[in-house]
Image: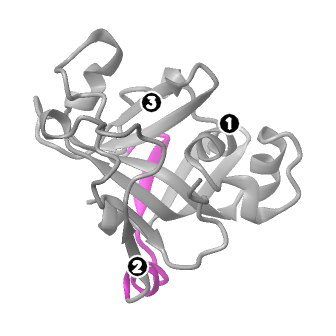
């Protein structure tokens, strides 16, 4: 699913208008099979939405600083999700820049999971939100999606995990060379 989301549009409908990103970087997390996953040790109050149903968001606060958003994709009761790591601004760019403190460069608007959620205005209150029809958030394909999913997808190790916490797993997917992707540290 992490690879399949690349090139898709992620849309958030706010009262002040749409914010739309084209997803250019994602990471997969596999619950009980994955020591880097928040679902590794089972359901807790903090991670309940990660256990389904699929098509919902799991939003959490990372290092007490910024929110990160995952698309839940495993069957209900199974903790599997895709972290949205980076996106290319498509619509509502001025609103996204304003949410990011007036960032001028489109490349930096959503180039990292914390930047992405800030640009889209996603907070913990969106945890468990549905991506199904009729909601204020959704993923969509358009004519450009297939171009992004063609050749040029890099599959690498995940970023930001400690040694032995799944850092060696090649579950990060990125549109190769895309200027809006995050940078590995």
Residue located 18% across and 21% down the image: 41
Callout 3 secondary element: strand
Disc 3 to disc 2, C-alpha distance: 26 Å
Callout 1 secondary element: loop
Residue located 65% across and 66% down the image: 180
Disc 1 to disc 2, C-alpha distance: 35 Å
Q: Earlier in the sequence, mark 1 or mark 2?
A: 1
Residue, disc 2: 153
Residue that extends furthest to the front in the rendered view of this protein: 163
Q: Is residue 77 above or below residue 103?
A: above
Image-based side of 185 in relation to 37, left or right: right
Name the spot of residue 73 as percent of width and height, x first.
22, 46
Residue, disc 1: 15
| Segment tinted magenta in the rendering | 134-150
Residue that extends furthest to the top in the rendered view of this protein: 45
Image-based side of 90 in relation to 77, left or right: right
Image-based side of 146 in relation to 49, left or right: right
Marker disc for residue 49: none
């Amino acid at each position: 699913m992490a690879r399949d989301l690349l090139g898709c549009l992620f849309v958030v409908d706010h009262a002040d208008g749409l914010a739309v990103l084209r997803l250019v970087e994602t990471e997969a997390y596999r619950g009980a099979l994955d020591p880097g996953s928040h679902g590794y040790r089972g359901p807790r109050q903090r991670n309940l939405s990660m256990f389904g149903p699929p098509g919902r968001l799991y939003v959490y606060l990372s290092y007490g600083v910024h929110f990160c958003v995952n698309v839940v994709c495993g069957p209900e009761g199974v903790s599997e999700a895709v972290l949205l790591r980076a996106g290319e601004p498509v619509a509502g760019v001025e609103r996204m820049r304003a949410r990011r403190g007036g960032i001028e460069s489109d490349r930096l608007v959503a180039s990292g999971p914390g930047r992405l959620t800030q640009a889209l205005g996603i907070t913990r209150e969106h945890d468990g939100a549905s991506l199904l029809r009729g909601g204020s958030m959704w993923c969509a394909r358009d004519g450009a999606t297939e171009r992004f999913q063609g050749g040029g997808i890099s599959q690498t190790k995940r970023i930001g995990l400690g040694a032995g916490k799944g850092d060696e797993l090649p579950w990060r997917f990125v549109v190769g060379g895309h200027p809006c992707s995050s940078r590995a540290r």
